Image: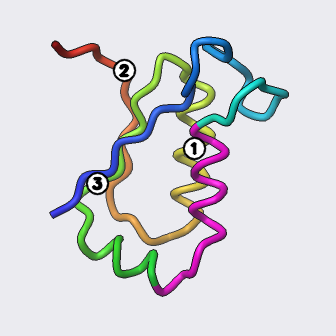
Amino acid sequence: RIEIRLDHDLSHEDGYCNPDGPTKEKTGTDFVKWLAAQDFTKLEKIARLTDFVLMHSYNPPGALRMAQIVQDLGLFDKIIIEPFKYQH
C-alpha cells in the first residue's frame, strides 16, 4: 500500500508563505495543482493503492489549501492534516 505525504513549504525562502500568494519557489500547492491536472485514469489507479494522503506542514493555511485540492479530486478516501514533525 502507498502513503502519500506532502509538505507545503518546499524551500526555506518561502517558509510560512500564503498558499495563494507570490513565492520565490514552487510550493506543495503547486505540486497538488499539477497532480490534479494529470490523467484522471492514472490518478484513480494510484488512489486505489493509497491508504492515505498526509499534509504535514508548519504552514496550516498551506496544508489546508493542498488538502482541499486533493479532496476536490474525489479519489482519496482518507486525507490527514497535521503539523510537520522532525524525526531523526
In the current view of this chain or complex, which residue is farthest to the right? 22
Residue stretch rendered in magenta on the structure: 28-41
Marks 1 and 2 sit apart, C-alpha to C-alpha, by: 14 Å
Q: Is residue 67 above or below residue 35?
A: above
- Image marks 1 and 3: residues in contact by CB distance under 8 Å: no
Residue at image position (61%, 14%) is 15
Q: Quadrant of residue 64?
A: top right
For disc 2, the marked residue is: 84
Q: Quadrant of residue 46?
A: bottom left
Residue 36 at x, y percent in the picture: 61, 65
Residue 87 at x, y percent in the picture: 20, 16
Under mark 1, the amino acid is Met
Q: Is residue 66 above or below residue 41?
A: above
Q: Residues within 10 Å of mark 2 (few under 14, many from 20)?
A: some
Picture disc at residue 66: 1
For disc 3, the marked residue is: 52
Under mark 2, the amino acid is Phe
- Mark nearer the N terminus (2 vs 3): 3
- Mark nearer the N terminus (1 vs 2): 1
Q: Quadrant of the N terminus?
A: bottom left
Q: Quadrant of the C terminus?
A: top left
Q: Quadrant of residue 62?
A: top right
Q: Residues within 10 Å of mark 3 (few under 14, many from 20)?
A: some
